[in-house]
Amino acid sequence: MSDAVAYMNEATQTARVIDGLPENLALRPIEKVGIIGAGTMGGGIAMNFATAGISLTIVETKEDALSRGLGVVRGNYQRSADRGRFPQEEVDIRMDRITGALAIDALADCDLVIEAVFEDMDLKKQIFARLDDICKEGAILATNTSALNIDEIAAVTSRPQDVIGLHFFSPANVMKLLEIVRADHTADDVVATSMALAVTIGKVATLVGVCPGFVGNRILAARQREAQNLVNQGVLPWDVDNAFNAFGFKMGPFQMSDLAGLDIGWKKGAVTGNPIRDRLCEMDRRGQKTGAGYYDYDENRQRNPSKITEEIIADVTGIAAGASGLSQEDILARLLHPMVNEALVIMEENKAQRPSDIDVIWSFGYGWPGDTGGPMFYGDLVGAEKILSTMQALAANNEAVRPAKTLEKLAKDGGKFVDLDLGGLKTG
């Protein structure tokens, strides 16, 4: 067994341990679950509970949306049964655990309610204000938000102690990672119950704190920022992705963008800080779903470098394709080192319990290659001095970038990224 594999095995077990919780803390019973939203996320979340034998009610606002969502869930189960993963009769057994409803009042007797609507703060606040009115005392009120401020959501209720973030990763019925987001007022027993429930539904859970993007997406944002900066300097998207594929990631930044859809957060006519993306979207090159994005796609969704994208990049940047002269090693340093740096800032802000939790998040949520563990383990493989050098060079050209104080200290005094103890996420 390699050092990285042994480290990740231990890290996965350690992530379940919540520092600072009282011993023998009584958990809240979770016998019935409510889910708001029957879309991709809501349906996937529902499958976790139905598979684990837990009854649930899923709420939508319109009959067609509810029927469509339940149909997708049944279809997913049926495909698994057809592949021999469980007996055919199990499809109906699992579906019988799911009740559809068109009124949020149907969730009044649930022990746990998970909101899984789209990322709109006003809508989420409206939902939580309503849940505060209808849900029974002691019910856990959870949001599946991937980035929004959970303290702001909790503030519209009279019971912020019952509010927590349960950030499932898509597709929620497949991805193992669950970021459990503790807000300022979340009660200890809500945290403990959520961690125990994660085990019940087969998830690998980590406790994180409230900040934009939490841990996983916050580090991802640092990577995406630098990926776009490289393209702005004439590096082609497939050169970036090829470097990531060679490192061991199944998908690079631009492959991932095309899969997710370039129009996430974009509207026709919008002028954003990413003019290349704007131009692509205006041409209806919005990713795999339209047959073209950064890449061109054939009828089997096989990607090919796009001459159109290359011309757009050259037109927007004024730099000839490939003129940067950066090697794969240079590209990886420009993207991976800022991820390590952002992880350190997260640790400094006490938004994660321990360095190994960050590696668990990136291993199970984003497919970090197993032979380099995760951002913190990788940091030790590269060395703090080299990462600091990269960050200093980036900071010289971008005021928004700063080397973490802990990175400077490690480079000066030595020590390991994975052994850092900066106080951890405050509990209790």
Image (cartoon, rainbow, N blue to C red):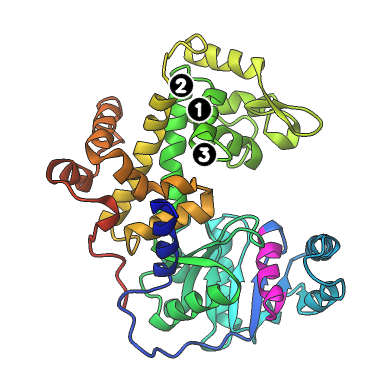
Q: Which residue is mark 1?
A: 240
Query: Distance between the Cα atoms at labels 2 and 3?
Result: 24 Å
- For the point 26% across and 40% down, the residue is 383
- For the point 29% across and 25% down, the residue is 397
Q: Residues within 10 Å of mark 3 (few under 14, many from 20)?
A: some
Q: Judge left or right: residue 79 versus residue 283.
A: right
Query: Distance between the Cα atoms at labels 1 and 3?
Result: 13 Å
Q: Which residue is mark 3?
A: 248
- For the point 40% across and 80% down, the residue is 187
Where disc 3 sits, the SS reads: loop
In magenta stretch: residue 123: no
Q: Which residues are magenta?
A: 41-57
Q: Amino acid at mark 1?
A: Val
* Sequence-earlier tag: 1 or 3: 1
Q: Residue 3 in the image: x percent, y percent?
A: 38, 53
Q: Which residue is mark 2?
A: 232
Near-viewer residue (310 or 196): 196
Q: Amino acid at mark 2?
A: Asn
Q: Residue 271 in the image: x percent, y percent?
A: 54, 29
Near-viewer residue (410 or 216): 410
Q: Is residue 170 above or below residue 285?
A: below
- For the point 34% across and 49% down, the residue is 376
Q: Which quadrant would the N terminus be assigned to in this image?
A: bottom left
Q: Amino acid at mark 3?
A: Gly
Q: Is residue 112 above or below residue 333?
A: below
